[in-house]
């Protein structure tokens, strides 16, 4: 409750600051179109659509310090950036409930808004509890799985929609953005085909995560089965004895040589699972869910395609895919 109240106060402060500033300077005093994204995949998709950025569009990634989408709370500065932008892109799940109030107080009433979950419609999946997975302490109603960006098929759909929105806020350069988007979507589709081929060539059709599991969209795209300690949006960090025992037994039953984790430094659960198997020699490898990419990582060359390419190489090892 305190967090909700403080966020409401923050939005009021931001709205009052901009209400005064907007009257004196106009909504966007720089004259350049402004795009604000919440997470890294959205930011990188827009970057590829902009290309050489002929209109010098200002592009902002709000979660640029490695903050987790599920626990992120915007600052006053974040609310202010959203308030005057021309295009705002966010995921739209339970973690983004704060966005509703932020948009109500936005100064720019002509803002184009893209909610990824709404855009994908019936392609969005509910989180599921599979056999052996540890449930949440509080399970009121089903939540949608927010990690839609981890599907290359979803990424292609979303980039097409984002390209249309960019064209809307900068019509004179629409042809350039459309061409950039088409070239980028072709790369997404090519990588999607590589994933499909790798799964076809694989000896194993199941992955096991000693961690949260945000890769539901990815495994469903290619018909893979999975086991994991927690759902993707779980706040749990400690696995029960029953969860560890079940997953360790599954590793033995399926003769899995790899236990997977997601980005982060705590791989204790995966290590404990391995220690409780018969062989105790499984590789512990990481699939990057792109939930902790920072602005520093971006400056050092991190991009959506390269991360998904690295994930493919890790997946090949986990599945025992032939070359």
Image (tube, rainbow, N blue to C red):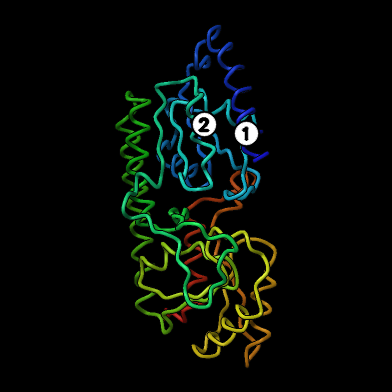
Residue 193 placement (x, y as % from top left): 33, 65
Mark 1 neighbour class, 10 Å CA radius: few under 14, some 14 to 19, many 20 or more: many
Mark 2 vs mark 1, CA separation in Å? 9 Å
Residue located 58% across and 50% down the image:
70
- The image quadrant that residue 252 belongs to is bottom right
SS under mark 2: helix
Residue 234 can be seen, yes or no: yes
Work out whether mark 2 precedes mark 1 in sequence or the reverse, and give the earlier one.
1
Of the 4 image quadrants, the one containing the C terminus is bottom left
* Residues under numbered marks 2 and 1 in contact, where contact means CB atoms less than 8 Å apart: yes
Residue located 35% across and 33% down the image:
165
Residue 56 can be seen, yes or no: no
Task: Find disc 1 in the rendering and name its residue.
Answer: 7
* In the rendered image, the vertical position of residue 250 relative to residue 57, given as above or below: below
Residue 77 placement (x, y as % from top left): 63, 28
Q: Is 147 left or right of 124, judged from the image as shown?
A: right
Residue located 63% across and 79% down the image:
244
Mark 2 neighbour class, 10 Å CA radius: few under 14, some 14 to 19, many 20 or more: some
Task: Find disc 2 in the rendering and name its residue.
Answer: 101
Of 72 and 319, nearer the camera is 72
Residue located 64% across and 47% down the image:
67
């Amino acid at each position: 409750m305190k967090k909700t109240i403080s966020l409401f106060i923050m939005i009021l402060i931001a709205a009052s600051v901009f209400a005064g500033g907007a009257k004196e300077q106009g909504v966007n005093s720089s004259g350049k179109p402004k795009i604000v994204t919440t997470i890294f995949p959205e930011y990188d998709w827009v970057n590829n659509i902009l290309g050489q950025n002929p209109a010098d569009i200002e592009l902002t990634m709000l979660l640029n310090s490695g903050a987790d989408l599920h626990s992120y709370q915007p600052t006053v500065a974040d609310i202010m950036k959203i308030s005057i932008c021309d295009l705002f892109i966010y995921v739209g799940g339970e973690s983004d409930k704060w966005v509703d109030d932020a948009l109500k107080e936005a100064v720019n009433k002509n803002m184009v808004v893209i909610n990824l979950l709404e855009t994908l419609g019936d392609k969005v999946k509910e989180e599921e509890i599979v056999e052996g997975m540890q449930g949440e302490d509080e399970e009121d109603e089903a939540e949608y799985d927010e990690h839609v960006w981890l599907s290359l098929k979803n990424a292609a759909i979303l980039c097409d929609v984002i390209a249309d929105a960019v064209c809307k806020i900068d019509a004179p350069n629409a042809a350039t953005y459309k061409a950039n988007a088409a070239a980028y979507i072709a790369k997404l589709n090519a990588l999607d085909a590589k994933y499909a081929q790798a799964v076809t060539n694989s000896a194993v059709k199941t992955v096991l995560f000693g961690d949260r599991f945000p890769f539901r969209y990815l495994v469903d795209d290619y018909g893979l089965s999975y086991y994991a300690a927690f759902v993707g949006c779980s706040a749990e960090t400690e696995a029960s004895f029953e969860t560890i025992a079940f997953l360790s037994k599954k590793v033995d039953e399926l003769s899995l040589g790899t236990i997977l984790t997601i980005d982060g430094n705590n791989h204790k659960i995966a290590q404990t699972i391995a220690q409780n198997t018969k062989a105790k020699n499984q590789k512990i490898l990481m699939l990057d869910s792109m939930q902790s990419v920072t602005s520093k990582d971006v400056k050092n060359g991190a991009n959506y395609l390269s991360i998904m390419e690295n994930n493919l190489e890790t997946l090949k090892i986990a599945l025992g895919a032939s070359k």
